[in-house]
Every structure is written in structure tokens, then in C-alpha cells.
Image (cartoon, rainbow, N blue to C red):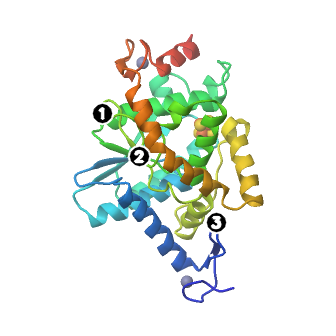
Amino acid sequence: MACKNCLNNPVIQLTNSSVKLCKSCFIKYFEKKALATIKSYKLVEKGDNIGVAVSGGKDSLTVLSILKKVRDKFTDIKLEAILIDEGIEGYRDKTIIDARKFCDDNKIKLHIFSYKNEFGSTLDNAKNKVALKPCTICGVFRRYLLNKYSRKLGFNKLATGHNMDDEAQSILMNQFKNNAEVSARLGPITGIKKDEKFIPRIKPLYLLTEKEVASYAFLKGLVTTFTECPNSFDSYRGYVRDTLNDMEARFPGTKHGIVNSFLEMLPLLKKHYGKNASEIRTCSECGEPCTGNICQACKLAKKIIS
Ligand code: SF4
Ligand code: ZN
Ligand code: ZN
């Protein structure tokens, strides 16, 4: 069957649909959908100073490339990239090369911060010192550094490469773990209540599936190989991801169903938890925002270096 729009040879069948598209029609479809998400959720506004969280992987380079198009069209937007080097040998050292290349080629300033410099240990070392899954340690440190340095660099928004698969996984993980309050922070733009200490995150790829993002990144030459973190295979998210992929293969439309029904409930969740949100305090060790006396990152860093 030929491309639905122009009769050229198709390169992809869209997720949850029988529509097939050729390379050029797919690229147009993808960019139109990302731009429509940005517009309908007001993810980018005049005067924004946006930091893009990059890893050098397909999702983050795609979101950076889409936002660069927006920036090139609206010159009153500032765009820089921020990368967190967790210290995962054989993985992050490789993707950093791709991130640097993309930023150099496109004249985008790239800021790099590492667990080693900030917490005195790489993730590879830290995971042998505490009885926690590497992804748990990684998540706490990454969220901390991204928020801290986005604020210090003056970003008013932080863009991430989260796609529909990532969001569907997070929604289910929060359901399974009875974490409705954490789900209230999800959505195309994160957070429950505005607080200047927390930089909101925007997700322009929110309504595009992993398969679509990977296809776009390859077709545009943003990446040439896929490198997966060696820790991802042993994670709770990895298990939920595989289960969801299995469900999607048997029952097409599963991921769209999860995310779209969640979007209907999200305003109610935000309203409910916004009223009852915990007070934001300041960590007595590092001065970063937290809900207790000491933030999670400081607690974890102490365990690792003790
Ligand atoms: Fe960190 Fe886990 Fe992601 Fe690897 S898979 S980068 S350890 S959160
Ligand atoms: Zn076509
Ligand atoms: Zn702290």
C-alpha cells in the first residue's frame, strides 16, 4: 500500500491506525503534531528562556531539533541545552558525543553537570554502595541537578523528550504504587502549583509514540544507533514498558487510551492536590527546595560517601 498522501513508498505505519506514510509526509506529520501540542498546551510563549534536557539519545535530540525550529521562527525565545552525566560507562560517554555534535552543529550552548562533581560519585560507583535500584538513585540526582541548574542558568522552562510511551508508563506506575499525587504532577506541562524554586517541565513530544519519535530521529539523521542504558533492563519502568508494549501489540490503541483518559482526569487531580500540596521548604544542607528538612539528594549523597 502506498503513502496515504502522495502515493510514494511508505516508511512507517502510524501507531493505532492503518495509515502509512512516506518519509517526507511522515516528517511533516510529526512536526505538525509536535507543534500542535506546543500550541494547544501553551508550552512555549514569547520571551521564554528554555533549557532542553538532553542526553544525546533519540528523544532528547528530537525535542531539541523541534524547539530549534520554533526558536528560529520566533527570535524572542532563548534556547540552551543541559546534560547530566550520571557516570555510566559504555553508555553516557557515548551519547555525550552525539549531544555535543548536535549542539556544535546547531550553535546551541550545552551545559554539562555530573554526579561525580556534584555528589562525589558516579552512578556506577554509587549503585554498589546502597541497596537501591540504580534508576532510583539516578532519578533523585537527575531531578535535583536539572532543577538546580535550570534555575541558576535562568531558564523559566525545562523541555524534556518525554513521549507518549513514557507518560503511559508513568501513569501506570503511579497507579500500581498508589501514587496519585505524583500523577497530578504529570501532563504536557508539569507541576501542581507554581513555585519559583521549581522550574516547570514541558513535553512537546507528549502525544507522539516512542516508535514515531525513533523513526523521526533516524529519518532526520539525528541518531545513527540506539544505545540503551544497561540499568534499564532491571528496572520497574522496564517491566511496565514491556507489559505495555505487549498490550499495545495485542490491543492497538492501549497507550493512546491510557494517556487520553488521563488527560481528561488531570485537571481534577491538579485541583485536588493543588489545594493540599505540601509546603515547600529549604534543605538545611544545600539550600535547594524540598518538603522536609533535608532533601532526598543530600540524604542519598551522604549514604553514598559514608
Ligand atoms: Fe538512570 Fe535508570 Fe535511566 Fe539508566 S535507565 S539513565 S540508570 S534512570
Ligand atoms: Zn507521502
Ligand atoms: Zn539538599
- The answer to whether the residue bearing label 2 lies less than 8 angstroms from the nearest atom of ligand 1 is no
Ligand 3 image position (quadrant): top left
Amino acid type, residue under disc 1 in the picture: Lys
Residue at image location 44% in from the left, 69% down from the top: 32
Tell me where residue 113 appears, x and y as whole percent.
43, 35
Residue at image location 38% in from the left, 17% down from the top: 286
- In this picture, residue 107 sits left or right of residue 57: left
Counting residues from the start of the chain, the first of labels 2 and 1 encountered is: 1
Q: CA distance from mark 2 to mark 1?
A: 20 Å
Local crowd at mark 3 within 10 Å, few (<14), some, or many (≥20)?
some
Q: Comparing marks 2 and 1, which lies closer to the viewer?
A: 2
Q: Which mark is residue 15?
A: 3
- In this picture, residue 274 sits left or right of residue 30: left
In this rendered view, identify the residue nearer to me: 100 or 215.
215
Work out which quarter of the rendered image holds the C terminus and state it: top right
Local crowd at mark 2 within 10 Å, few (<14), some, or many (≥20)?
many
Tell me where residue 85 appears, x and y as whole percent.
51, 37
Counting residues from the start of the chain, the first of labels 3 and 1 encountered is: 3
Q: Residue placed farthest to the bottom in the image?
A: 7
Pointer 2 residue: 189
262 w.r.t. 125: above or below: below
Tell me where residue 21 appears, x and y as whole percent.
59, 78
- In this picture, residue 274 sits left or right of residue 9: left
Which type of secondary structure does the marked residue at label 3 adopt?
loop
Residue 7 appears anywhere in the view = yes
Q: CA distance from mark 3 to mark 2?
A: 23 Å
Amino acid type, residue under disc 2 in the picture: Ile
Circle 3/circle 2 CB separation < 8 Å: no
Pointer 1 residue: 152
Counting residues from the start of the chain, the first of labels 3 and 2 encountered is: 3
